[in-house]
Image: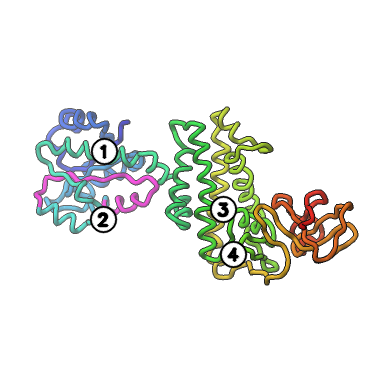
Amino acid sequence: MNYKIGWIDDQLWDVISVEKQYKDLCQKTFNDSGLEVVLFATDWNTFNDQRGEANNLDAVIFDMNFAKSGNPKDDSDKSGLVYCLSWIDQQKKSPRPILCYLYSGRDEEQIKDFLCDYPESFSRDNVFRKEHGELAVMAKKIKKDLDEDNSSEKRIRRRFSKELDLAREISSQCENYLQSILLVAFNEDGVEPLEIEKTIGFFRDIFEKCLLVKCKEEKILPPLEALGEASTLAFSKIVVSKNGCTYKLKEGTELMDTATSYLYGKVLNIMVNDVMHVKDGLRIEIRKHIQQTDDLNIYRGMLFMTLSILQWYHDHREQLSTNPVWYEVESEDGDCFDGEDVIVTINYVKDKFVFSKNAKIKKKFSLDYSKGMKLRVKQKDMVENTGFDKDRYPYYVDCNKHTIEE
């Protein structure tokens, strides 16, 4: 890979022509390191006039003394360098900063004083003196720095710096998971299906090991025991936790808006599970799609949906942690977990339905129901109640999905 270099020096080109000087002294040295000087300037104005080309540079080499325009007044004229230093500070804040180096004929003391005056602009490792052999040393250093700066990790960090900041807000571990996902999603050399399947697990890790933990620490979520319970609270108003407690959202509040909770459920409850679990009944067959095609768009879709969840945390963390939207329901004889089942206690009997604290259960007419009777229900069979009484009874159990608990 050839890198484009700019060079500003009032004396380097004053003896013979730029073309001959570059050809005789620099071209081979720089080309051997994969570098090409494409912009020459003897003062700031000349450099500034070529700003369009300068913005495509990978690195710029500066002399210590040169004028804003024309020849410097004397050996201490830094009027051009002052403008360049301002440019250096500005472009350092850009997504793709241009690396800068100093190449000077001044003695060590003068260079030391210069670095004290401008400590933010040049590091000592990027300063070279005009003496025998230093040009080649500088060229190798520039090539090494640019190779490192153009690594996949650096490019991803520049391109997705804001997104990685969102993950870092949760934890450094979350940031690492997201970076791994990004490297696969935008790998210029392509990735193997097995690598895609492996890193899809990182989506679950972002939620389960990072976001859920952080939200519980900050009391955005109650002290739930499982990721699925957090999902329940994102979709409905109440959750019965394995810790034996029941938590409910305050009237008129929501943990997530409808669009965000939809994305949360899509990427986590459906898409990640579809890839991570090997069982019958998978609805999407994402693993099969990944194995049979080179299409990364599904993977990227999961990525961008996950970024929306991280944005939700960033936007609402202060409000939700300061004023939690949930509360613990006072303990009473009601629904509780027993392994993978839920034991519900009938509080009310009607013609076609019986009701527990949280669930509406359709009667099986071969059974006799009475208040206080306990029923056993599989967790997966306690589905969302979509009827008119869903606020009072958020769960629904069909007639053939429960048995009497002896």
Residue under label 4: 222
Residue 154 percent across, percent down from the top left:
37, 43
Please identify the quadrant where the C terminus is shown: bottom right
Residue under label 3: 309
Locate residue 46: give its quadrant. Answer: top left
Horizontal side, residue 252 vs residue 13: left or right: right
Horizontal side, residue 135 vs residue 237: left or right: left
Residue sitting at the far bottom: 330
Is 273 in front, or is 365?
Answer: 365
Quick check: 63 above or below 294?
below
Which badge, 1 or 3, comes first in the chain's sequence? 1
Give the residue drawn at x 63%, y 35%.
Answer: 285
Please identify, in this view, whether the residue under mark 1 or under mark 4 is nearer the observer.
4
Identified by mark 1, the residue type is Lys
Horizontal side, residue 83 vs residue 159: left or right: left
Is 269 in front, or is 240?
Answer: 240
Residue under label 1: 144
Please identify, in this view, whether the residue under mark 2 or under mark 1 is nearer the observer.
1
Q: Is residue 70 visible?
A: no
Which badge, 3 or 4, comes first in the chain's sequence? 4
Locate residue 240: give its quadrant. Answer: bottom right
Number of other residues with Cα within 10 Å of mark 1, as a class: few under 14, some 14 to 19, many 20 or more: few
